[in-house]
Image: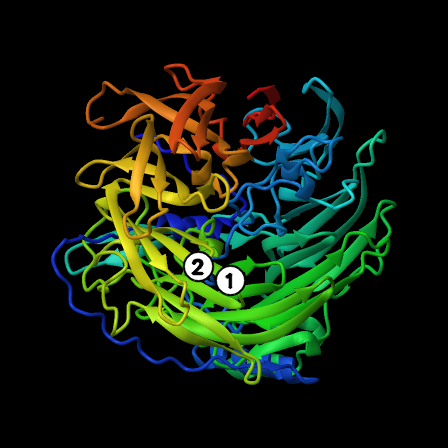
Amino acid sequence: MFCPLPATRVPLLVAVLALAACGGGSGSGSAVAPPEPVQAVSPVVLQASQPGALLGYVQNRLNLQIDQGLAGNGDGAVNLAGTALPGVSTATTASVTPSGVSGADTASPAFSSTTLQEGGVDESDILKTDGSRLFSMTVAAPGEQRLGKLAAYTRLADGSLQAAGSLALPAGDRFDGMHVASSGELLALVGQNQQFAMPVDIIPLVSTTSTSTALTFAPRNLTPPQTVINLVSTKPGQPLGNTASLRIDGELVDSRAIDNTLYVVTTWFPRFETVFPTAAASAAQRKDAVARLTSAQILPMVAVSNSLGATQPAAQPLMADTDCQLQAANASNAVQLTTITAINLASPTLERSSRCLLGGVNAIYMSTQNLYLATSRYNTVAQGNNLFYPSQPTTDIHKFAVNAMAITYRGSGEVPGHLGWDASKTSYRLSEYKNDLRVVTFTNATGWLGELGAAVKNAPVSPAILSVLREDTAAAKLKTIASLPNAARPAPIGLSGEQVYAVRFLGDRAYVVTFRRTDPLYVVDLADPADPKVAGELKTNGYSDYLLPVGPEGSGLLLGVGKDASADGRVQGVKVSLFDVANPAAPKELATRVLGKAGSASGLDYGRHGINLFAVGNITRVALPVHVNDTLVSAPNSSNSYRPGYQSLARFEVDAVNRTLTDKPVMTGQTFATDFAGYQASSLAFERSVQIGANIYYLGSQGLLTGAPW
């Protein structure tokens, strides 16, 4: 089966770990016992760092590493170090300008740009529009696997596009997306410089009867990672031009923007190579080096350059040591700092502020007022060919209030389970509503990718737990006020051995998809946040990876995009489903479309921005890039294997009044010959679309931007 792999910004370490996430389970329709009570966990306590406290914390962690026989280099791991980090991406509700839908701005037609999780909170993407201009980030030449070109287009009165300039992106950096400042005259490109090598170690395997060897692969940094933010002037009538850049020590986790404030989350493992003695040094010598560390050697640095190349200064600490929150309950001995940096895009001096958290991060979620960092208390562990969390992982969640440049720590809480392995979905497992935070976690330690895996033994009764947290301002805590299942409502969310796929919170409801052989769609009633309950359930073949609201508010319609599956759970083509959830007790699947055979994929398989929705009255126009496998391969041992046929922009219309899903003609991108010519050079990760007025614009994987009437 030809299955294209996602080509995202996520570091190779994360990709290797994610691909190793194979396991599975066997679902059963039999009755289940009530869930066991959730085990109590140590309370999360974050403390503001007093002068010198950060240094002492780090020195303690390094000395613990040395006591355990490790190198004391900060990573705190024996095998693959670090926590799987989310990729730069996001999305899932139709996004338009405030005046776009209402028609208040008659000079500019309504439009739909990047699909967002929360209205008013922008997310980086490779195709953006303000209704009059379009900006795209594309490969510089066909077949390249990095975005090397920025282009601008002006939309003319007849809907056609006129090229308005282009700019080559720096070869040493990998940019993943951009934000448009509220003025429309500045772009903030976000990415990082990180490069990887893949050393191979040959390990002898000796038994009583034979000797053999095994190869192990471990990705390592070639250069220290830096997050890169390039600012590009896009003033109409002037060439595109770099105006400034910021380089922050650490990997890019994700970014958001509200008005002219850009929020960037990074994570940093301090580099101690030049501080510690040689590999042969004794434990005492290493501890002596630890004692001589300074705060400056721990904090990430930032370098700010203007368009003339001047740096002010060459590098400076991103923050003071007192700008950090210490997490004493973190069980990891790794020395890792996660940082939130706010940047004022309207400031000529690039005014900025930063706050730091000791520890890693698995996901971020942001509302218009708060930013949440979520992290598993235990690192992801690789053992053999499997990726798993240790038994009973716990996820810590930290809340920061944001108001322009002000970032204020509000409190922390914890929930049982983890947020899964798919970095593109983790933010959708959190949602803020009426000051409460709702979270859906996955309770099983192992999972699988797409196809059925080996049976999961001792799988939890319910694969999902829904928790509701409320801020206790006096104690600076996020207290759990309810969870589901519970003793009063023991019915599980999903069957034992299933995996959580899609999660979507909309108002006072949650929608959760679990999958093993069929797709149970659960509707959870959160009208009383202290007493959540499953209101209804629907089982269909296959599963949805994403659930998107369609139609005017209150329509009770969801669009599900995922994969079809056979009766035994074998994954087939791309599936698009229209669900009616107006009656939460009786959800219905109104219509489905299946595109292609096994191995087919959609843009949503490569990130959460791989779909575009545009509401025009009661009609929602849906544009979805797809890669279609359609021809059975006639070859030995090729059962259920299909050849790549074409990539295109599939289009649909959802009518909220008639509650129908209608096909529209596809916009053809590429077709593939029998020798697969062009197939390897075509990645759905680089395909997007936007809609403006009566037109649709399709960005193909080779960088060609085409438009047509809807």
Comparing 70 with 662, the one in front is 662
Identify whether 618 is placed above or below 515.
Answer: above
**Disc with the residue nearer the chain's start (1 vs 2):** 1
Q: Within the image, what quadrant is residue 378 found in?
A: bottom left
Mark sitting on residue 395 = none
- In the picture of the structure, the residue carrying the numbered disc 2 is 508
* Residue depicted at x 46% and y 71%: 469
Instruction: Give the residue displayed 54% in from the left and 59% down from the top.
Output: 365
Q: Which residue bears the numbered disc 1? A: 433
The answer to whether residue 589 is visible is yes
Element marked by disc 2: loop
Residue in the foreground of this view, choosing between 630 and 64: 630
Residue at image location 41% in from the left, 45% down from the top: 556
Q: Nearer the viewer, residue 394 or 132?
A: 132
Q: Amino acid at mark 1?
A: Tyr
Indicate whether 227 appears above or below 172.
Answer: below
Quadrant for the N terminus in the image: top left
Q: Is residue 76 left or right of residue 176?
A: left
| Residue for point 85% across, 31% down | 238
Q: Position of residue 287 (x, y in %)?
A: 57, 82
Asked whether the residues under the numbered discs 1 and 2 touch, taking CB atoms below 8 Å apart as contact, a structural biologist would say yes
In the displayed structure, does residue 314 sit left or right of residue 657?
Answer: right
Quarter assignment of residue 570? top left
Residue farthest to the top, as pictured: 673
Name the secondary structure under disc 1.
strand
Going by the numbered disc 2, the residue's amino acid type is Asp
Q: Is residue 621 above or below residue 555?
A: above
Looking at the rendering, which quadrant does residue 559 occupy?
top left
| Left or right of 441 in this view: 333 | right
Q: CA distance from mark 1 to mark 2?
A: 8 Å
Estimate how packed mark 2 is, as few (under 14), some (14 to 19) or many (20 or more) residues with alpha carbons within 10 Å. Answer: some
